[in-house]
Amino acid sequence: MAQLYHDASINGVAADGVVPQNTPVFDEGNEEQLEEFLGDNADYNEEAEEKRYYRRKRFLTVKSVISASLGAAMTYGVYLGLLEMQLILHYDETYREVKYGNMGLQDIDNKMLMGINVTPIAALLYTPVLIRYFGTKWMLFLSTGIYALFVSTNYWERYYTLVPSATVIGAMIVPFWASIGNYITRMAQRHYEFVNYKEENMREQRRLPRGASHKYIIIFQSIFFSIFHLCFILSQFPVYFFLSKFLYGYNHTLCDVKQCGASIPGGLLPGFNVTVLHSLPSSVNLIYIESALMLVALSSMLLILILCGSAYRPTEEIDLRSIGWGNIFQLPFKHARDYRLRCLAPYFIYTGFEVLFACTGFALGYGVCSTGLENLPYILTAYGLSCCVFSSLGLSLLRLPRQIPLTAGPLLHSCLLIGLFFWSPTPRDQSQSPLLYLVAVLWGIGSALNKTSVSIIIGMFYEDKGRQDFVFTIYHWLQALAIFIVYLWSGLPMMAKLGLVLASALVSVLSYLWMEHKISLKVQPRIPKIPSPRHKVKGYRYLEEDNSDESEEEENDSEIDRGESEEEDYREQPLQRRRKHKKGSCYEQAVEEE
């Protein structure tokens, strides 16, 4: 009967209407389990868990930077290596006649190079729209996919495969570089947020203090370029391991070459033999090489897709694209009002000149002309290895004034260019190889300083996450414009090419120093205001006016943040615009009073 009363009391009903007294619902063992389940866990340490969480976040940012750097290096290594191998094979007259007959491979190559070099001129119109539409990480992933598409078209070399794919690559060069510059800078800023997660600004997701993330921008950009410049080494692997077995020696390829270096009257390498292959590679071997390159290209895509984290939070990406597509289209042009970008524009153009001159003008006009085509991979490898090692000199910005590394690169190149003016190596003279490698290494030091320092200073000047993609678009568009100019001047004499590169180096230094002078005088730049996001009224999460989930304290904090951001934007405006703003506000106030 006692068991019956006990069971009935558990179910809330007493048997025969009798309510048992002092009948425990749970025994002592169940009460202990309940307290253990609902009570505080003595082993749980909230602060330690928070530290572990943000340590994982910091590791993810570093992993994302390294993965993006490796993916970019592999992508460009495949692209440059395939392009070099393709141009060497198509240059050989016997290969063209035996393999393709009267198809006109040289004409196809010329149009392919035109597509790669001419198409980026229009990239300023669509690059910010693509980055905002797809997002920074996905734009980077899609760009690597386009480079993989170019590799795949080489399985069937025809006009309708090679030329369209080269044109699409030209269209994606600026979006690729703008997205990767933006991605590295954003990862540096997020790393700062994860390191300083205890600060009030980080917990409330406010704007970062000015100059707070400069240290990590310097470190991450140096890491990126140290890894990325491996692409110059990777691009020589197809020639090292495959094509070098079929190349003639320098005595055959240079038999009609009379002048080298500064004395070249015009063109890249006049008198170079039209047959450079002593035997033709089989189609099966070419398919194997192209399949290996395709595998590397796909691996780089997977590396970026799987191991790279997002550059923005989901709500931030929605805010970035909610300012209106018309504003996104116009803002790169509006940023040209900033005198810092106008003064850096010659520097941007010069960085495009010097890299392409090192890979074409110097490598062919001085290196191949004197030591033969078989030494071209070694010269470019020396240049790439120098860039990899000395990209770490960007870390000097942590201690030295930024003027030193930003002027050291152009001044070093200027000294080398002056020396190249008076140097005309003798054709087929192998004794000049050590001097060629020395110039390649020194030129790589200057290139590493230029590339790393310019990307760092852009990230330091433009810390607002809402305008970084616009500024990197302008930078890489001007670089692409410089590459187009180099493509146009390919038929000029070597002295004219040296003069143009030297003039661009000196102008870039003077323009940069003038910018630093204006900054020292505290001249305020005209920075265009980023419009506030205009969210569609769909879903409760992004409603700004009537947010039912927002407490009164959060509402007050958001009003304070909005007031601070408006005050910062007001301070960034020049004095004349402030006066107009004051007059307009007083007039509006008078109208309202009436």
Image: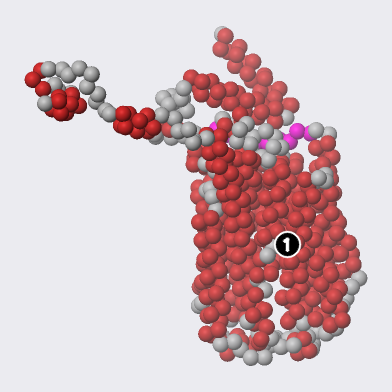
Q: Is residue 174 magenta?
A: no
Question: Where 304 falls versus 489 (above or below)?
Answer: above
Residue 548 showing in the rendered view: yes
Element on which disc 1 rests: helix
Quadrant position of residue 8: top left
Specify the principal SS of the magenta part: loop
Q: Amino acid at mark 1?
A: Cys
Name the residue tied to disc 1.
388
Q: Is residue 529 magenta?
A: yes
Residue at 51%, 24% (x, y): give it.
Answer: 554
User: Magenta part of the protein: which range?
Assistant: 523-532
Question: Where 503 falls versus 330 (above or below)?
Answer: below
- The C terminus appears in which quarter of the rendering? top right
- Which of 37 and 529 lies nearest the eye of the viewer? 37
Residue at 69%, 51% (x, y): give it.
Answer: 221
Residue 269 showing in the rendered view: no
Question: Where 178 falls versus 580 (above or below)?
Answer: below
Looking at the image, the residue that sits furthest to the left is: 16
Residue at 67%, 79% (x, y): give it.
Answer: 240
Q: Could you tell me residue 472's position as x and y percent? A: 65, 49
**What colouring method underlies this structural image?**
secondary structure
Q: Could you tell me residue 533's position as x and y percent? A: 52, 34
Quadrant position of residue 241: bottom right
- Which of 535 and 186 lies nearest the eye of the viewer? 186
- The N terminus appears in which quarter of the rendering? top left
Question: Where 22 falls versus 443 (above or below)?
Answer: above
Residue at 53%, 48% (x, y): give it.
Answer: 310
Indicate left or right for 452 with 44 as reference: right
Quadrant position of residue 120: bottom right
